[in-house]
């Protein structure tokens, strides 16, 4: 942790000297923030970016020093061949497609709504936010002497951005860098597999080319043989043409002889034709008589066929009506069965949904009963210790300040013995309500047993924790609790201790806070005692 902090300070000093040398002006705290933000924008880039869209950076919050420093620093800056444009976002309904949205420290409470309002922008927060809403955060110490960059790689990648390894090595965790390297290794293996398949395809194509060359060589040999055969056939054709001419000459002589014979035949045919004309006239008369007989027969057959067709049509219609009646009965039966089945299925689905809803409700009630103290609505001892252990580990990992409070109602046994357990229970409930009303949304509080409570203040310096403890003590002392008109004075003693580097689990911190609580009791009760180690 110290090595990382030393590296941040060295980088901050180098950046300070470079910016100061470039502008011939001393580097201020706000110009250092502007420099860090520009470096983040350079190293966290969209996976797909429209080159024609202008690079506009929106700033939410009235931080005049930051806006002035950013305008001055980015006047000559160009990112991915685009000049930077700074715009102050005044209207909460502004839907301009900003490439980057910077959230000043005064607007950190609205980080969840800002993330929803600009779903495609890179969100940079000037200060620490909760992990699930974080993308990139610039965190400075109370004296404004150092700046630390933290990021949530999961949210950045989910938003469609990619992070350079140098940025992860500088501001990410080892797990983020390991995941980034594993993803790059997977992409390289995929490319290597693609190259291997491409090489295999090239080898296959080369083999096919060799086979094609061999095929062309074989075809070339066949072509040469074919050309040789063609030359021989051409010679044979020339000889055949000579023989054909001789045959044609003999054919012409024979045609002349045939022509003479044909003339004789024509003369004889003319005599035959005259005789045939007479015979044909007699045949036509006989054919007319036969046609008349056939016409009468055809009319009779047509009438008989029409009667037979009418009988067949009537029989078909009767059969069709019978079939339609059967189909109608079947359709009605199927419809009734389908409607009955649909009603049954709808009823069954309704019962299933009702059972699922009841199961979800029961699970929620079971979780609430398992984690919450039924009287005070605070975390019970087991759930508080589990949650506190998680917070302690998180604070140790991020090197964030944290404080633990042990609280006990003063003279509670006397209240129980004097007024009864019902009044004692009401006193516990009233004190628990004070804790809940004065609890920050990211802190946790639980009832450890009886009148003893504990609270974990995350991301909280010891001075701020003491202010919170004093406020809680005063609020409890101001409670107006009366029994039969007689006021009962309630006070609490508080033991406060910060989280240290030597604390490995929540038990050690609670033991130290418990010692501080005993000192508060010994100091006269209704007081806050701090024990730092």
Image: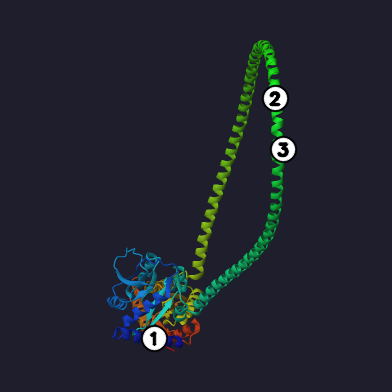
Instruction: Give me the disc on residue 529.
Output: 1
- Sequence-wise first label, 3 or 1: 3
First along the sequence among labels 2 and 3: 3
Looking at the image, which is closer to me, 26 or 476? 26
The answer to whether residue 192 is left or right of residue 440 is right
Quadrant in which residue 307 is drawn: top right
Q: Is residue 318 left or right of residue 372?
A: right
Q: Residues within 10 Å of mark 3 (few under 14, many from 20)?
A: few
- Numbered disc 3: secondary structure: helix
Element marked by disc 2: helix
Task: Using the numbered discs, state the Cα–Cα distance from disc 2 to disc 3 in whole angstroms.
Answer: 21 Å
Dot 1 lies on which element?
Answer: strand
Q: Which residue is mark 2?
A: 260
**Res 13 → quadrant:** bottom left
**Quadrant showing the C terminus:** bottom left
Which of 418/325 is in front? 325
Q: Point out residue 172 in the picture as x, y percentages from the top left corner.
A: 46, 78
Disc 2 or 1, which lies upstream in sequence?
A: 2
Tell me if residue 139 comes above or below residue 271 in the rendering: below
Residue depth check, mark 2 versus mark 1: number of the one nearer the observer: 2
Q: Residue at x 71, y 39 (%)?
A: 246
**Residue on which disc 3 sits:** 247
């Amino acid at each position: 942790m110290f090595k990382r902090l030393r590296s941040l300070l060295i980088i901050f000093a180098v950046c300070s000297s470079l910016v100061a040398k470039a502008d011939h002006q001393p580097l201020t705290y706000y110009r250092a923030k502007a420099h860090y933000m520009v470096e983040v924008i350079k190293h966290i880039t969209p996976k797909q970016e429209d080159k024609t869209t202008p690079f506009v950076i929106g700033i939410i919050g009235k931080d005049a020093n930051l806006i002035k420093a950013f305008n001055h620093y980015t006047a000559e800056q160009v990112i991915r061949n685009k000049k930077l444009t700074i715009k102050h976002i005044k209207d909460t309904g502004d839907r301009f497609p900003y490439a980057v949205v910077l959230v000043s420290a005064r607007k950190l409470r609205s980080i969840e709504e800002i993330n929803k309002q600009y779903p495609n922008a890179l969100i940079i927060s000037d200060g620490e936010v909760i992990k699930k809403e974080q993308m990139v955060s610039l965190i400075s110490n109370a004296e404004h002497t150092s700046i630390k960059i933290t990021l949530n790689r999961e949210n950045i990648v989910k938003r469609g951005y990619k992070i350079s390894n140098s940025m992860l090595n500088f501001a990410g965790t080892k797990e983020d860098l390991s995941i980034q390297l594993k993803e790059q290794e997977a992409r390289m293996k995929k490319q290597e597999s693609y190259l291997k398949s491409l090489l295999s395809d090239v080898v296959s194509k080369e083999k096919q080319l060799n086979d094609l060359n061999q095929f062309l060589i074989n075809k070339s040999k066949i072509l040469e043989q074919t050309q040789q055969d063609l030359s021989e056939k051409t010679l044979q054709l020339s000889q055949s043409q000579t023989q054909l001419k001789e045959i044609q000459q003999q054919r012409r002589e024979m045609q002349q002889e045939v022509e003479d014979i044909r003339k004789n035949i024509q003369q004889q045919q003319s005599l035959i034709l005259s005789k045939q004309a007479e015979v044909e006239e007699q045949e036509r008369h006989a054919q007319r008589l036969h046609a008349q007989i056939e016409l009468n027969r055809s009319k009779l057959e047509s009438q008989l066929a029409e009667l037979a067709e009418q009988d067949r049509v009537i029989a078909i219609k009767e059969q069709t009506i019978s079939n339609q009646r059967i189909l109608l009965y079947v359709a009605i039966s199927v419809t009734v069965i389908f409607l009955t089945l649909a009603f049954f299925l709808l009823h069954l689905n309704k019962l299933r949904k009702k059972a699922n809803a009841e199961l979800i409700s029961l699970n929620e009630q079971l979780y609430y009963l398992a984690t919450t103290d039924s009287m005070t609505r605070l975390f019970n001892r087991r759930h508080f210790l589990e949650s506190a252990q998680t917070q302690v580990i998180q604070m140790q990992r991020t090197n964030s300040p944290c404080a633990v409070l042990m609280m006990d109602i003063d003279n509670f046994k006397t209240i129980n013995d004097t007024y009864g357990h019902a009044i004692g229970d009401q006193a516990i409930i009233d004190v628990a309500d004070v804790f809940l009303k004065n609890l920050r949304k990211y802190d946790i509080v639980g009832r450890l047993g009886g009148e003893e409570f504990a609270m974990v203040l995350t991301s909280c310096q010891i001075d701020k924790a003491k202010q919170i403890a004093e406020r809680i003590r005063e609020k409890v002392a101001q409670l107006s609790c009366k029994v039969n008109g007689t006021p009962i004075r309630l006070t609490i003693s508080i033991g406060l201790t910060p989280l240290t580097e030597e604390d490995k689990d929540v038990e050690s911190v609670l033991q130290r806070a418990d010692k501080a609580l005993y000192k508060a009791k010994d100091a006269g009760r209704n007081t806050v005692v701090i024990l730092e180690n």
